[in-house]
Amino acid sequence: MNFDLTEEQKDIVKAAREFAEKEFPDLAQECDREEKSPKPLWEKACKLGFVGVFIPETYGGAGLGYLEHCLINEEFWRVDPGIAHFILAGTFGSEMILLFGTEEQKRRWVPPLVQAKAITGAAITEPDAGSDVSSVRTTAILDGHEYVINGTKTFITGGTLAHFLEVLCITEPYAESPHDRSSVITVETDPKGFEATKLRNKLGLPASDTAEISFSAVRVPKENLI
């Protein structure tokens, strides 16, 4: 079995390295010092095709794979981890939509991620549960045609910048298996009761936005259930 990179993959590595080496150094110190994420650079990376390369062409992506996504990550992180994390984590969570979402959900939420029109994130970690998904306590109770979400998520990448989040919630509290009690719901970040608070003074990746998310009776259409 041949484990060498293909010529296309080598070209991707070269392009990602050249982009990072050219664009990151002039911004890195300022972004770290001010704990800010350079959105114009993210927009440029989207236009050049570096963001969401694993997303199928049907939804605006390059139709490549996670290996190519990792190759770009390696080259970006090699120059500056904080900026790299901000640029490439903006699609984190879209994998769940691609794997389990309806066709309508995919066409609605995925294309904007590679068009520099939207940022998403995965809201899983909680203050008392860490990333132990079986201990999540955020609830989503169905009320007519809407879910009502209450709870708190913490250390959520892109939380104050995201246009929508994939949120892990308890939807079936009485299911026998703890893993059957939860579902993922896409939540847009502008409804009443949604609050994102930026976490500052991290030990690393200061240029990458991280937030605590609070849901207080946030109402979401049941069609947003992934």
Image (cartoon, rainbow, N blue to C red):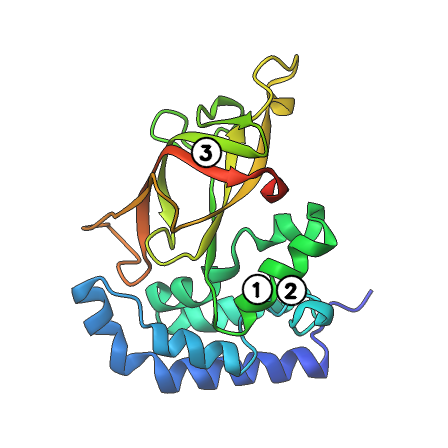
Pointer 2: residues within 10 angstroms few (<14), some, or many (20+)? Answer: few
Nearest the eye: 156 or 206: 156
Q: How far apart are marks 3 and 1 (CA)?
A: 22 Å
Classify 89 as above or below 51.
above
Classify 39 as above or below 147.
below
Sequence-first tag of 3 and 2: 2
**Where's the C terminus, which quadrant?**
top right
Q: Name the residue under label 3.
A: 131
Amino acid type of the residue that numbered disc 2 sits on in the rendered structure:
Leu
Image location (x, y in percent) of residue 25: 29, 80
Residue 137, image quadrant: top left
Sequence-first tag of 3 and 1: 1
What secondary structure is found at the residue carrying circle 2? helix
Residue 11, image quadrant: bottom right
Label placed on residue 70: 1
Instruction: Tell me whether circle 3 and circle 2 mark residues in contact (CB < 8 Å).
Output: no
Instruction: Farthest residue to the right: give it.
Output: 1
Image location (x, y in percent) of residue 73: 50, 67
Residue 182, image quadrant: top right
Residue at 48 percent across and 73 percent down: it is 116
Image location (x, y in percent) of residue 1: 83, 64
Taking 209 as reference, is 48 left or right?
right
Image location (x, y in percent) of residue 59: 68, 67
Q: Which of marks 3 and 2 is in front?
A: 3
Q: Distance between the residues labelled 3 and 2?
A: 24 Å
Pointer 3: residues within 10 angstroms few (<14), some, or many (20+)? Answer: some
Q: Mark 2 points at which residue?
A: 67
Instruction: Tell me whether circle 2 and circle 1 mark residues in contact (CB < 8 Å).
Output: yes
Taking 91 as reference, is 31 left or right?
left
What secondary structure is found at the residue carrying circle 3? loop
